[in-house]
Image (cartoon, grey):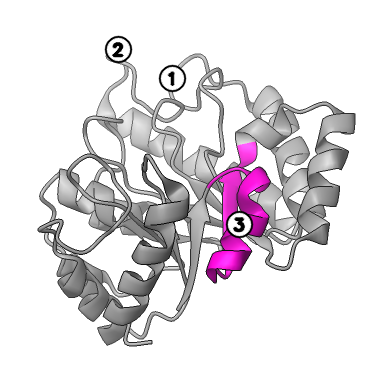
Amino acid sequence: MKFGICTSIDNIDALAAMGFDYLECNVSQLAGLSDEDFAARKEQAQKASIPVSCFNVLFPKTIKVIGPDYNKEATAEYLNKAFSRVQALGGTTVVFGSGGARKRPDDVDFFSAYRQLVEVTKQIGEIADKYGVTIVIEPLNRGETNMINSMAEGAQLAADVNLPNVKLLTDFFHVAKDGEPVEDVERIGAFAHVHIASGKGRLYPLPGQDEQYPLFFQCLKKIGYNGRVSIEGKTEDMMKDAPIALAYMKGLAGE
């Protein structure tokens, strides 16, 4: 497995020095930069010894993809800009979490919202494909959104979209937060990306947190997962906690 952290490109050299394999950054923030500021970020990434392989937070809070506020043309314009910048940085994977963007409004019934989400996810996947980008659907806990709250629901959405570059993510934090069975990782068995943080406070994964990390990694190994695992969590001291988390995860992965 390869290990990274969701953080600013400003931290890329520090992550490299700690032994991380890549950095995952916020695509909506990059999409909002001026051309000049983005060029500076691109230069910073190109000089680093590890890549910016993955991106999260696909949509800003101002964009809605469910309900009457969805604007197909404006969404396409945003996605083309975002994915062109992902491509320029050498990125290959973008996480579709964005719970606020995909939240079902109260006046939209679930079935209509789901059908719309299928079509929007197809749009995302088709535009991403032009830039060589894979989309991974991120199931989110019920406190963050009301659409796609379990790995099984995420798998169903990916199956209904039915595009080769639209796949599934599992995030330990969301699994633990909602009490979803960790064993469903093995039951579903097809993931293209992984996020991890403690279900209690979304902290960096560290020993002694009374979490089912060992079972989570056992399930990943049973399905033959050998891809990327990104810490998407909080810490008061990244320089202290990140190396401990990396060593802990490598031990759980048997590396």
* Disc 3 crowd, CA 10 A, few/some/many (<14, 14-19, 20+): some
Marks 3 and 1: in contact by CB < 8 Å?
no
* Disc 2 crowd, CA 10 A, few/some/many (<14, 14-19, 20+): few
Residue flagged by tag 2: what amino acid is it? Asp
Q: In the image, which residues are magenta?
A: 7-27
Q: Would you name the residue on which mark 2 appears?
A: 107
Residue 53 lies in what quarter of the image?
A: bottom right
Q: Would you name the residue on which mark 3 appears?
A: 14
From mark 3 to mark 2, how far is it between C-alphas?
Answer: 47 Å
Expressed as whole percent of the image width and height from the top left, the position of residue 131 reads 76, 55
Residue lying at 40% horizontally and 37% vertically, measured from the top left: 115
* Disc 1 crowd, CA 10 A, few/some/many (<14, 14-19, 20+): many
From mark 1 to mark 2, how far is it between C-alphas?
Answer: 8 Å
Marks 2 and 1: in contact by CB < 8 Å?
yes
Marks 2 and 3: in contact by CB < 8 Å?
no
Expressed as whole percent of the image width and height from the top left, the position of residue 124 reads 60, 44
The quadrant the C terminus occupies is bottom left
SS for dot 1: loop
Relative horizontal placement of residue 92, taking residue 68 as reference (left or right): right
* 26 part of magenta stretch: yes
Residue 176 to residue 111: above or below: below
SS for dot 3: helix
Relative horizontal placement of residue 248, taking residue 216 as reference (left or right): right
Residue 129 lies in what quarter of the image?
A: bottom right
In the rendering, which numbered label is found on residue 67? 1
Residue flagged by tag 3: what amino acid is it? Ala
From mark 1 to mark 3, how far is it between C-alphas?
Answer: 42 Å
